[in-house]
Image: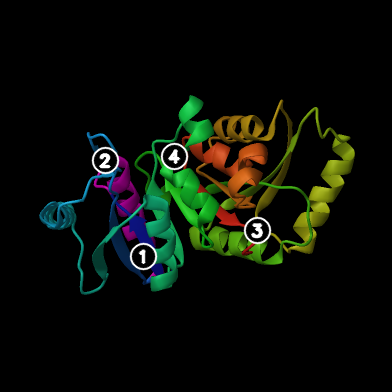
Amino acid sequence: MKKILVPCDFSGTAMQAFDLAVEIAKKSKGEVLVMHAIEFAPAYETSFVAQPYVFNATMQEELEKDAQKNFEEMMRTRDIDIDSLPVSFYTDHGTITDTITQFIDDHGIDLVVMGTHGASGLKEFFVGSNAEKVVRFSHVPVLAVKSPVSLTSLHSIVLPTMPDLSHHLFVEKVKMLQNFLQAQLHILYVNTPVNYRPEKDIQAELKDFARFYKLEHYTVNIVNSTDEPTGIIAFAHDEHADMIAMSTHGRKGLAHFFNGSIAEDVVNHVDCPIWTCTLNEA
């Protein structure tokens, strides 16, 4: 976690993500890259034939200057020694998700830390939160936060999983996260009516999963729920978990529309921080 990206619109949640990223960078002896995406909403002039509205270059320059001022103000209110902790600022233009994912590739980012308000109802179904979309498209881990959180408060991690023995790189990343935080891992299987299985079978497979990956400082847990996201969120709440770590298939297009993503659903509705990593990259 040497190069940490914070997509920042200078909202309260974005600045909370920045504070957490600074803590992570201090511990990992890394650097923080703050990126502000300027997204131009399409506009049209009224005429007999609709014409795209040409964006004013002067307005673009003003937006960049405003972003720079906001960044400088954010830095002024925090006690950061830039000689020991590099913090750099960038602006870019385009849709938020595309801009962030391209920035990840261009700058060799290891971790994205971003604030989110979540999404619900029709907005969630058709659009989704920005964090949800970044989770879907990012090929590096994403840590989404909704409220102020300190790195030192993250002592327990819920790991919802199927007892799959083919996800070596993903589990290795989870182990690195657990070691970095010195946290306890709560391995969780959600038993649903659609995919119901006897608990004794699940219990045995989860223990084999833990032995196979040589996990340490963990508990094995099974909950019954109507669906996976509901079970994960309820368990995390009941256990007062500090974080959830999940894999995602990163489905796109119609595959996402019809199948969705458990991780993205949890990002939209859980209160504690959630760390995600795509399986197709893991």
Compute the Cα span from label 2 to label 1: 40 Å
User: Which residue is the site of mark 2?
Assistant: 43
Name the kind of residue labelled 4 in the image.
Answer: Ser
**Is label 3 or label 4 in front?**
4
**Is label 1 or label 3 in front?**
3
User: Which residue is the site of mark 1?
Assistant: 25
Compute the Cα span from label 2 to label 4: 22 Å
| Residue 21 inside the magenta-drawn segment | yes
The numbered mark, 2 or 1, whose residue comes first in the sequence reads 1
Secondary element at image label 4: loop
**Is label 2 or label 1 in front?**
2
User: Which residue is the site of mark 4?
Assistant: 129
Name the kind of residue labelled 3 in the image.
Answer: Leu
The numbered mark, 1 or 3, whose residue comes first in the sequence reads 1
Visible in this render: residue 270?
Answer: no
Name the kind of residue labelled 2 in the image.
Answer: Ala
The numbered mark, 3 or 4, whose residue comes first in the sequence reads 4
The numbered mark, 1 or 4, whose residue comes first in the sequence reads 1
Residue 119 vertical placement versus 164 (above, below): above
Compute the Cα span from label 1 to label 4: 26 Å
Q: Residue furthest front?
A: 48
Q: Would you call the spot at circle 2 few (<14 residues within 10 Å), some (14-19), or many (20 or more)?
A: few
Q: Would you call the spot at circle 3 few (<14 residues within 10 Å), some (14-19), or many (20 or more)?
A: some
The image quadrant where one finds the C terminus is bottom right
Residue 264 vertical placement versus 193 (above, below): below
| Left or right of 23 in this view: 174 | right
Give the quarter of the image for residue 215. Answer: bottom right
Q: Which stretch appears magenta?
A: 9-28
Question: Looking at this view, is 268 or 75 the one in front?
Answer: 268
User: Which residue is the site of mark 3?
Assistant: 279
